[in-house]
Amino acid sequence: MPREGNRHALLVGAGIFISRIFGLVRQMIFARYFGLHSVAADAFNAAFKIPNILQNLFGEGVLSASFIPVYARLLAQKDEEEAGRVAGAVAAILALTISVIVLIGVLATPYLIPIIAGGFQGERRELSIRLARILFVGSGLMVLSAWCLGVLNSHRKFLLSYSAPVIWNVAMIATMVAFGHRFTLSSLAVALAWGSVAGSGLMVLAQLPAVLRVAPRLRFGMSPHVHAVMRSFGPVFVSRGVVQISGYVDLYLATYLPLGAATALQYAQTLYLLPVSLFGMSISAAELPEMSSALGDARAYLNQRLNAGLRHIAFLIVPSAMAFLALGDVVTALVLQVGRFTAADSRYVWGILAGSAVGLLAQTMGRLYSSTYYALRDTRTPLYFAIVRVILTTGLGYLFAFPLPKALGIDPAWGVAGLTASAGMAGWVEFTLLRRSLNRRIGPTGLPVSLTLKLWTAAAVGAAAGWAVKVALGPAHPRLFAIPILGVYGLLYFGLTYAMRVEESGRLVRRLVRR
């Protein structure tokens, strides 16, 4: 990527890294108190998904695709007056819409639970309803935080917006530490929901001063540019809705699997989303304002930025996927194996994480392709391909979660791994469609075959060496053996890619040497 793009991606990555580290600490503490096979853990994770509909449908992804291209283009044209009018109008419309939806959501929660978590009955169902009603309020605040992120990103202020979730994580961590030994698990889950709401509000308050500094001309006022945002918002909203259906289908199916399946799925998704956020989201988020600011015929410019971004993503995602596949038990044990969370639980989550590794590269690169479409003001094409993905995820998910384990004669609980593997396969189909369609518009894009072979070869050799270290160390405590195992794996991967003259590895080494 160009030098400026690298710097912005680094800032986004730094913010996401900090927030994700705190997120892992939050999950570690959650695992300590709630474990894997508890009613409260299943209820909280299911309830957390329901109000997340708001955050996912109205939040960062939708605002990035509809608001940032218009707002960033106005800033590039030095029309700050109109940019302030657009930002203010979007904030007002968003606040009003979200307030109404939060109210409806709180009232309608008992009717949503059977749709999202149909397998829950009795105590799990009642606790899920209570928690979801609380969490709806926090999700509404998260949407306003996403608007702040959109403004700051357009002004190339990435670090604050992407590190703000640290505040949310700290609020939840503090709640569990304060009440973990004093409350029952059900009462702790309720306290944790309120801690999440408090953290969401603090996130908005932390970003508002910076928003007002970079955009002092905020005001409400309708204009053709506001209508352009709204026109783009519709298809992206539907597209995000379609994509979210995939995640909710997985949760819905998991609730019909044995106790702990829904929680195990959430744990695996937390680990899986770490490289997606750090590498896929950071690069895609940094590139969208740059691509959107291009004036005139920008096809060659978009092609160059997209191909450079894909190389950067693959260099970092390939070793992540191989680690999940070959050393996922070590990764899971390092982060989660404490308190009620056992070694057997780590192996179970590893299986689910290995399924996620199937589509990790496709889904992260797909994010950058979608950002390129949004920069071209095309929000409909990604929608069509997202629909294909959801149809495949639903059909394959059911087959892999229920009939396949039965046919193989394995524990039904392993059906969760089938859910993540089928989602990965569907992700590859979506990625292929996105690439093929975009290639016709801006020219050839994608990873060179030689680079792909080098990356996977280096990752496989590194994983084999890490596995050998694991066998040699024997059954030690996970935090003792995880560092040497993953350390050997990482050093070999970066050393081999440097020896094979992979450009991204050489650039990384030169940067470290300079420092």
Image: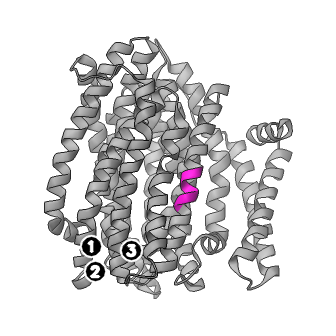
Disc ID at residue 124? 2
Q: Residue 450, how many percent across, how many down?
A: 72, 43
Disc ID at residue 280? none
Q: Residue 433, how many percent across, how many down?
A: 43, 42
Image marks 3 and 1: residues in contact by CB distance under 8 Å? no
| Residue at image mark 3 | 262
Local crowd size for mark 3, using a 10 Å CA cut-off: few (<14), some (14–19), many (≥20): many
Left/right placement of residue 294 relative to residue 56 reads right
Q: Residue 273, how many percent across, how many down?
A: 51, 57
| Residue at 56%, 40% in the rendered image | 12
For badge 2, the amino acid type reads Arg
Q: Secondary structure at mark 3?
A: helix
| Residue at image mark 1 | 128
Residue span colored magenta = 18-23
- Image position of 460 with respect to 124: above or below: above
How far apart in space, not on screen, are marks 3 and 1 (Cα)? 12 Å
Local crowd size for mark 2, using a 10 Å CA cut-off: few (<14), some (14–19), many (≥20): many
Work out whether residue 479 can be spotted. Answer: yes
**Quarter occupied by residue 333:** bottom right
| Residue at 77%, 43% in the rendered image | 505
For badge 1, the amino acid type reads Ser
Judge by depth and name the residue closer to the eye, 262 or 418. 262
Q: Residue 5, how many percent across, how many down?
A: 61, 29
**Between discs 2 and 3, the one toward the N terminus:** 2
